[in-house]
Image (cartoon, helix red, strand yellow):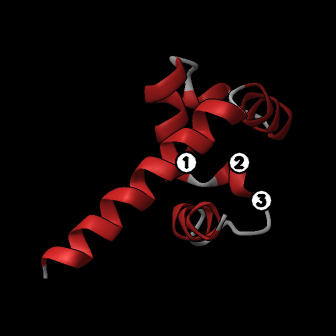
Amino acid sequence: MFAALRFLWNATRGHRLAPWRSEYLRWRLETYSGKRAETLTAKSVLGFMWDERGELLRFLAWTGQLEREARKRI
């Protein structure tokens, strides 16, 4: 859960109250889903996140695991 919140915090820098306006988040959604970033709205971003929530949670768990492994090696 902490990894998800930290990712959202970093990915929405400058747009924390309206994350669908974040250029980085729009770019990530475009590369992942193939939807054009210019056409993304709040409804489409939130709908995408709800539809893909399982995959997104697995991704965040994986990134958390990578971070833990990286800290062990230091």
Distance, label 1 to label 3, CA atoms, is 11 Å
Residue 40, horizontal then vertical, whole percent = 69, 31
Q: Which quadrant does the N terminus fall into?
A: bottom right
What secondary structure is found at the residue carrying circle 3? loop
Residue 49 lies in quadrant: top right
In the image, farthest residue toward the bottom: 74
Kindly identify which numbered label has been placed on residue 18.
3
Q: Nearer the viewer, residue 24 or 32?
A: 32
The residue lying at 73 percent from left, 28 percent from top is 48
Residue contact at pointers 2 and 3, CB within 8 angstroms: yes
Q: Nearer the viewer, residue 58 or 52?
A: 58
The residue lying at 51 percent from left, 28 percent from top is 30
Can you identify the residue that label 1 sits on? Answer: 25
Residue 65 lies in quadrant: bottom left
Left or right of 31, for residue 47: right
Q: Which amino acid does label 3 sit on?
A: Ala
Residue 12 lies in quadrant: bottom right
Can you identify the residue that label 2 sits on? Answer: 20
Residue 18, horizontal then vertical, whole percent = 77, 59
Distance, label 1 to label 2, CA atoms, is 7 Å
Q: Which quadrant does the C terminus fall into?
A: bottom left
Q: What crowding class fits label 1: few (fewer than 14 Cα within 10 Å), some (14-19), or many (20 or more)?
A: many
What secondary structure is found at the residue carrying circle 2? helix
Mark 1 or 3, nearer chain start: 3
